[in-house]
Image: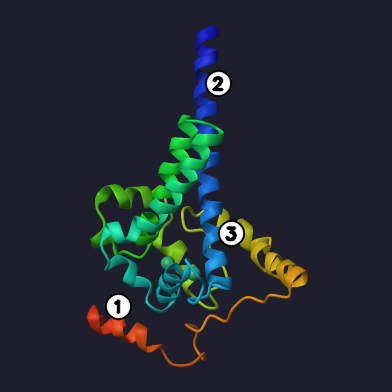
Amino acid sequence: MFWEVAWSVGVTWVVVQLVLLWLLVDLLSGVLHWAEDRYGAMEAPLLGETIRKNILHHYRPRHITRISFLACVGPTVAINLGIFAVLLMTVGLRWQVVAFIGMGMSVNAVHRWAHSTPSELNVVIRSLQRVRIIQTPAHHAKHHGLPRLTHYCAFTNVLNPVLDRLQVWRRAERLIHLLTGVSPRIDESLPGHGPTPEWVKDIDRRYRVSRSDW
Ligand SMILES: [Zn+2]
Ligand SMILES: [Zn+2]
């Protein structure tokens, strides 16, 4: 009896921790995405290329499905290797660290799958989307709708409605403006903000992208 209770409590605690780590990865994906969307500049030292990819993503959301899988997941793998090194030196090697880093590394893959058509995905990925373990295409499409100011989290369907209802991102922007005077950048991919930049059109030509598949 004692061992039965101890076993079920242990399993429950592991599941609770996994869910919390899953939500933490979702939250961090939202914070990074929001910071890139609202404050990123292509001219920024070191991060400029990452920001350029982010800006391209708003002009051409499906581009993420045309590059190789390795090119897609590379940035999140690199970020997470850095976090892994810090966690190893601070909290040490624990299963929670491995689970957190594993989920963190897969954020860009989940994002790519959210832009893929069902025929481009295998049955495992489609099932993970169907049971909402990873973000669904319909949910992520809300970020790419107008005015592209919501649904920054890119890993699950859980946190976005909560954060958007609480206006967390707008409140953070108001606080940043109050403290530093810095305002969010204008998203020039939105309608009415000028023509599509030539560097984006160059990519269209290189990948032979038709307007119906932006
Ligand atoms: Zn975005
Ligand atoms: Zn996207």
Where residue 100 appears, as percent x and y from the top left, is 47, 41
- Tell me the CA gap for discs 1 and 3: 28 Å
Colour logic: rainbow
Q: Residues within 10 Å of mark 3 (few under 14, many from 20)?
A: some
Q: Residues within 10 Å of mark 2 (few under 14, many from 20)?
A: few
Which amino acid, mark 1? Asp
Name the element at disc 1.
Answer: helix
Q: Mark 1 or mark 3: which is in front?
A: 1
C-beta proximity under 8 Å, tags 2 and 1 = no
Of residues 168 and 56, which is closer to you in this image?
Answer: 56
Residue picked out by circle 3: 161
Q: Residue at x 53, y 80 (%)?
A: 187
Q: Residues within 10 Å of mark 1 (few under 14, many from 20)?
A: few
Which amino acid, mark 3? Pro
The circle drawn on residue 213 is 1
Mark 1 vs mark 3: which is more N-terminal? Answer: 3
Where residue 62 appears, as percent x and y from the top left, is 33, 71
Q: Residue at x 73, y 72 (%)?
A: 177
Marker count (numbered): 3
Name the element at disc 3.
Answer: helix
Residue picked out by circle 2: 9
